[in-house]
Image (spheres, helix red, strand yellow):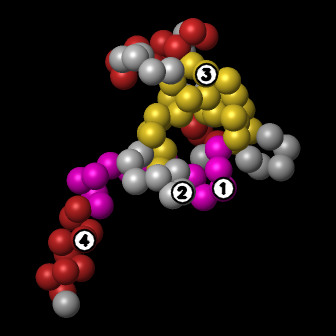
């Protein structure tokens, strides 16, 4: 996930159903990532601008967070596995 530092992307967080947008600010010495959450009312198209007022405070990403690869890939693998059984 080192290539996500400084970028806004969608992440799957543990114990959360829907993927969420996060701005990965930096990586700590112990390997955990510090991210910022977008404020309410900010348009998705404006998230890439990374304005200070559009994001909340810095927080740690929970362990087990991973980037979202897209729903289309997930559905295809589910259909293939269901047909085989």
- Residue 72 falls left or right of residue 13: left
Tell me how far mark 3 sits from mark 2, CA to CA: 20 Å
Q: Which mark is residue 78?
A: 4
Q: Is disc 1 surrounded by few (<14), some (14 to 19) or many (20+) residues within 10 Å?
A: few
Nearest to viewer (mark 1 / mark 3): 3
Of the residues under marks 1 and 3, which one precedes in the sequence?
A: 3
Q: For the view shown, which residue lies furthest in the left direction?
A: 83
Determine which residue is flagged by label 3. Answer: 56
Q: For the view shown, which residue lies furthest in the right direction?
A: 29
Vertical arrangement, residue 84 with respect to residue 80, above or below: below
Query: Residue 7: percent from the left, percent from the top?
Result: 55, 28
Nearest to viewer (mark 4 / mark 1): 1
Of the residues under marks 3 and 4, which one precedes in the sequence?
A: 3
Determine which residue is flagged by label 2. Answer: 14
Contact (Cβ within 8 Å) of mark 1 with mark 2: yes
User: SS class of the residue under badge 4?
Assistant: helix
Query: Residue 36: percent from the left, percent from the top?
Result: 61, 28
Tell me how far mark 1 sits from mark 3, CA to CA: 20 Å
**At 51% from the left edge and 58% from the top edge, which residue is drawn?**
15
């Amino acid at each position: 996930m080192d290539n996500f530092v400084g970028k806004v992307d969608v992440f799957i967080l543990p114990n959360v159903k829907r993927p969420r947008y996060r701005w990965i600010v930096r990586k700590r010495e112990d390997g955990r990532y510090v991210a910022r959450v977008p404020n309410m009312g900010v348009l998705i198209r404006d998230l890439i601008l990374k304005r200070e007022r559009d994001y909340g405070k810095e927080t740690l990403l929970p362990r087990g967070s991973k980037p979202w690869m897209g729903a289309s890939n997930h559905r295809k693998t589910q259909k293939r596995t269901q047909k085989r059984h």
